[in-house]
Amino acid sequence: MCVCVCVWLSGARDALPFSFLSPPFKTHLHPIHPYFRSFDRLAREPALLKAEADRLDRAALESALANRAAFPAAAAALAAAAEGLAAAASSAGRLRAALPAVAEAAEAAARAGPALAARRADDARLRGAVDHLAALLDGPDAAGAAARAGAPGVALALRGVAARAARLHPDLPAAAALDAQAGEAAHVAADAVRADLAAPSLALADCLAGVGHMRRAGLPGGAPALRAAFLAARGSALDAVIAGLAADGCGPASYVKRLTDAHRLALFDVAMQFRAVFPDGDGSGATATAAATPAAQSPAADLAAWMAARAGMYLRLLAAALPGLAAGGGGSGATPSSSAALPAAGGGGGAALAAAWEHAAYAGASLGRAGADWRPFLAPLFEQAVLDAFAAGLDGAVAGFEAALDTHGWVALPAGAVPPPPPPRPPTTSGDGSGPTPTPPPPPPPYELLAHPPVARLANGLAAALNDLRACAPPAAGGRAAGALAAACCRAGEAVAAAAQARAGGPLGPATAAADAARATADLALPHAAACFGCVYPGVRVEVEAAIAAARAGL
């Protein structure tokens, strides 16, 4: 139908106008109109189409044969794509299942963001302060090395850095550990400072520096413990000096003098240093603090207690040394004191006791400003020592008299054997040159006693004991000294009476000589001893009547 129409239209293109056709049909027929110009072309069209189709089939076959290997590859790729799509589907399912957890983790990361930022900032600060932290960590070791090297100031400064770090960061265990280690080094430094404060000779500047170091070390107990540590260190220095005196092996007088000098110098220095280092008030408000502090905890109370204890120790040491001083006198190592004038009489234990007493009194007077005036406590010590020395002298005199009575050959001396007594000595004057001020001289020894050697020995022994007592005669000891002399005289009277009675029934010569010795003892020796005692203690009477009566019992 279409072909017929096209043929008809082709045959009548010249005769029939195309005006009768509608515009769309005109537009459709216009392009193919040249194609159908002849019927020959139309007749060959099927063959041409078939040939074109064969050509296309051959081209497709050749293309298939040329690319026959691509088909298996395409199949394999298709299979792999199918497997990949299946795996992707499985992964997508797992991803879909994990999406809530991922969302939760993202929310947690978002919440932890500020903390992480803070940690990153802390890490940045740590990296910036790594040098300072390294120095802080090395601080305890450096403090210990400084303390061992004798630099307590450096050790305490490092300890202060560690303590500041511990106070600023109380929640850090590392800071607390560093503070503890630095504290141990500070204790070592404090011990070294105490050893320095215990030096025998210490200047005020060294005291101030040492106390400052100990204050920085932070001793438990505060200011009272610091004052106690300072006084203990200075006391240790004095103890070392005393131990050196004891080990020196000097004589009794030299030991007592050096002991007194050591205490006088040490106590005065410690008092001055303590008041300079620990003032009660410095004009800057400390006075009110001192007033509010209990008296038992004030620096003045601590110093007074320490001074009293050291003064008591000195008095105990002095009391222990006085017997040796009384017995040995000046000793081989005695060095006379320039401030103690020794009396001319005596020269034995009494003179040494007098010199020691005067020197100790001078030291006590000089320590009065320091609060250690021990002069009121010296009299009982020296009185007892003087009485013991006097009693020992009397005992030695009587013991020598008794021995002489036993060994003496009782023979009457011929007339004129006793020399006449020397002329009396002129009265002495006072040493100020103001005029003759007579002083009662001691009575001369009876020269008649030379006829009786045992009695003369007794008189000499009693005179020697009285000479020692005269060198150091405490006024309060007069009564007890008189009693000791009366007891010695009674013992001597009983001894000479026993000797006379023992020889009364024998030969006439020994009996007469013994009786004369008893008479000389009763009439001359014992009254002479009592008179000499009156020169030592004027107004104190010696009861020698019983001794005289005991001596006369042998007549």
Image (tube, rainbow, N blue to C red):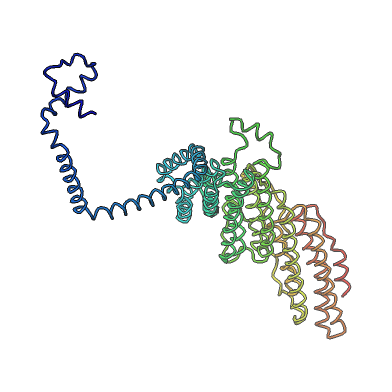
Quick check: 540 above or below 522?
Answer: above
Residue 71 placement, left or right of 199:
left
Name the spot of residue 237 as percent of width and height, x first: 57, 55
- Compare residues 430 and 253 and report the one nearer the observer: 253
**How many marks overall?**
0
Viewer can see residue 197 = no
The answer to whether one can see residue 298 in this image is: yes
- Indicate whether 42 appears above or below 296: above
Q: Which residue ends up furthest to the bottom in the rendered image? A: 507
In the image, farthest residue toward the top:
19
Q: Nearer the viewer, residue 267 or 122?
A: 122
Query: In x, y percent, where is residue 198?
Result: 55, 54
Decide which of 366, 228 is in the foreground and name it: 228
Q: Quadrant of the C terminus?
A: bottom right
Q: Left of 488 or right of it: where is 344?
A: left
Taking depth in this image into account, of 442 and 405 the one nearest to the observer is: 405
Lateral position of residue 246 relative to residue 47, left or right: right
On screen, 495 above or below 145? below
Where's residue 410, x and y in %?
A: 77, 81
Name which residue lies at 13% across and 37% down.
Answer: 44
Position of residue 188 measured from the top left corner of the image (x, y, whole percent): 53, 54
Q: Quadrant of residue 517?
A: bottom right
- If the image is split into quadrants, where does the N terminus sit? top left
Residue at 22% x, 16% y is 21
